Image (tube, rainbow, N blue to C red):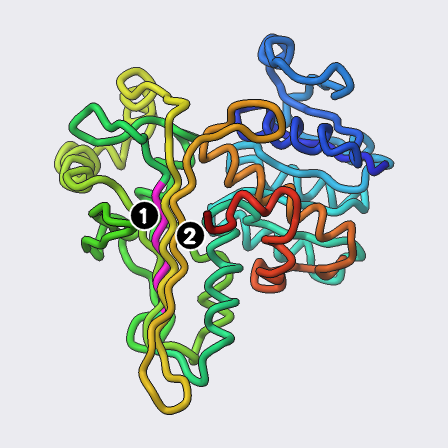
Amino acid sequence: MRQVTVIGAGKIGATMASFLQGSGNYRVTLMDRDAAALDRLDLSPEIERAVVDIGQGLAADRLGGQFAVLSAAPFQLTRTVARAAAEAGVHYLDLTEDVASTRDVRALADGAPTAFIPQCGLAPGFVSIAAHDIAQRFDSLDTIRLRVGALPLFPANALGYNLTWSTDGLINEYIEPCEAIVGGRRATVPAMDGYETLGVHGVTYEAFNTSGGLGSLCETYDGKVRELNYRTMRYPGHAAIMKVLLSDLRLAERRHILHDIFTHALPTTPQDVVVISVIVTGHRNGRSEQETLARSIPAQEFMGAHRTAIQLTTAGAICATLDLLGEGKIPNHGFVRQEDISLEAFLANRFGRVYRAN
């Protein structure tokens, strides 16, 4: 039985701990700074709970003897956890979408005897795996377009939105610059630009640039594709209101105020859906073709409990990656890209199966 540590006891971190302990193959320590929050969690008593304020640092000896550390901590703590993993000589996986901290993880991975696998969630994460798999089936590529939405099933406000995951992470992706390939060249484009509408399974959504969703795809496909971008999907009308908040009222400069507004005005919901559209165009056998992977994954029962769609897809993805690492199906040292993971192996995994087509 492998020992692993999960950092962060929020909704996703607690779900990760529950999945891994429930699998019967891992002995889990769940680490968080909030003792009361740890005590309130309805989790197996076999999960060890440790009160550690990662913001004050993480000593490598806290990870001694572990197979891996999985970070579900806020993106600001990515460097701290990754550095402790490097010093302890354990495998490292995270869920961050933050581009800058991922660069730091990559630097730590250089020459490391253990694997450093950042961005193991939904986007980046599964969509990177799916896009790479589809792209390999073309003789030459033209465009790769990734679209993802984590949405309420029953929108009931003007934003058409409920909080489903990290508020800080949401704000970060709405504000920070976005990587893309434009006209065959790597570029940085503004968040909230690139507005479009699209349909998935008969529902119309709007989409716009947000930061971090591409992972390492820009590097992988530099010089190989004319256009590569990632956009977040929302119900129509969301982008216009967000632009008022971020630009006209300049709340992009006062993130703490935006955080308070979202936290106090937008309720959470257990009734959500994750919508995915990965569209690749290019040439095969001399013909221009398009191939699309589309999924609509609702909240549902999984491993004996109700899970929200964002819990299923995010915790499921990183747990699947951990399994594949332990099974020797992905590289076990240095920096590991999501593109290094086989889609077939991922979907065959007990956790990755939440992404299978219905």
Q: Is residue 339 left or right of residue 183?
A: right
Q: Position of residue 346 (x, y in %)?
A: 61, 54
Which residue is drawn at the image coordinates 65% and 31% (left, top)?
19
Up-down: is 265 above or below 153? above
Q: Residue at x 28, y 51 (%)?
A: 200
Residue 178: in sight, yes or no? no
> Which numbered disc covers residue 318?
none
Query: How far from the left and from the top, in percent, is residue 237?
Result: 14, 39
Q: Secondary structure at mark 2?
A: loop
Q: What segment carries the magenta color?
A: 144-149
- The relative height of residue 7 versus residue 342 in the rendered view (above or below) is above
Q: CA distance from mark 2 to mark 1?
A: 9 Å
Q: Is residue 342 above or below residue 150?
A: below
Q: Is residue 347 left or right of residue 168?
A: right
Report which quarter residue 94 is drawn in: top right
The residue under the point 78% across, 53% down is: 327
Q: Secondary structure at mark 1?
A: strand
Q: Main secondary structure of the magenta part?
A: strand
Q: Taking 305 as reference, is 297 left or right?
A: left
Disc 1 target residue: 232
Q: Is residue 325 visible?
A: yes
Question: Which residue is more in the foreground, 127 or 302?
Answer: 302
For label 2, the residue is 213
Based on the picture, tell me whether residue 171 belongs to the magenta stretch: no
Which residue occupies the extreme front position in the image? 358
Q: How far across and down, in percent of the image, does residue 319 sit? A: 64, 41
